[in-house]
Image (cartoon, helix red, strand yellow):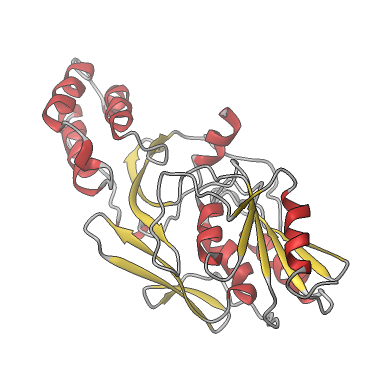
Amino acid sequence: MGGRISLLVTSVVLLFAAGAAPVRPHTPAEFLNRTIALIRAQSIDSAGVDWPRVQAHAAYLARGARADIGTLKALEYVIGELHDPHTMLVFPGQARTSEAEVPTVRTEGGIATLRLPGLDPREAGEGRYLDAGFAALAAVPPVCGWIVDLRGNTGGTMFPMLTVLVPLLGDGPAGAFVGRGGERTPWEIHDGQFWLDGRSMSPRPNPVRLPRRPIAVLTSGDTASSGEASLVALRGIARSFGAPTAGAATGNDVVDLGGGVMLLLTVARDVDRTGRVHGNTPIPPDQPAADAEGAAKEWLRTRGCP
């Protein structure tokens, strides 16, 4: 569990970050109160919290704090009251990984398997991730079906992942984020790019074009956050196999609290192209299977693969 949480620290959508101003009040008490107010106003899980009780206990925990850092224990208590595993504090140096894994494709028996790993947004591996994904897809010979393996995708920055997936997703609507008030921010695919509310979020266009073929998706309890966003984008055009996901199909705002500490605050849920809303509940596979890959191949054979 500890390994998964360490990666979930960086499994954030990062799409709202541009509008998140640093929280820098003048006193520790003001810092605490403003940050709690921000959490209360924006968290999608805010409605279930007894805020007068929580705020009073947070003030008690932070009593005597002489600097903002002295209130972090109180903020961790507040975050715990949300009961949202995707909202958290990230401290300097936390959640870094070794050299980023990259997408790979192997072809066997007319079936291409795309393994789409997570990508830590705090590592400089985005360009390498895209280069490897585009090259792997471009090198695939004609196939009868696809398997997208998300079992090891614990999250990260979603936009490079979905940009690699563009040729399989097809042009048109691919899902959405839904905020606390029900407002929706649509996901769309066109021109080789992933678009969010009419703005391209792809670091660069995917030049690969592929004919439409049946798609199977493999999931596990390690499929989390942006890995789940990749699954959500495929729902409605693919069949999933394996085990339920981690249950973090949500989008985060990123708030700079100063001193290198970041608040990752869940502000939206993922919506698939069929209109189903996902969130902090594991997404079950269409077909539970201990041998997910074997079950996926068997299904693809019923869809025209030899």
Name the residue at 33% across, 39% down: 258
| Screen quadrant of the N terminus | top right
Instruction: State the count of labels.
Output: 0
Name the residue at 31% across, 32% down: 79
Residue 26 x %, y %: 17, 35
Could you tell whether 34 is left or right of 165 in the image?
A: left
In the displayed structure, 2 sits above or below 249; it is above
Name the residue at 73% across, 58% down: 296
Residue 69 x %, y %: 31, 26
Could you tell whether 131 is left or right of 13 in the image?
A: right
Q: Tell me where residue 66 sits by quadrant.
A: top left
Q: Tell me where residue 199 sits by quadrant.
A: bottom left
Name the residue at 34% across, 33% down: 83
The single residue placed furthest to the front in the displayed view is 302
Which is more toward the observer, 286 or 265? 286
Q: Tell me where residue 115 sits by quadrant.
A: bottom right
Residue 223 x %, y %: 58, 47
Could you tell whether 88 is left or right of 135 in the image?
A: left
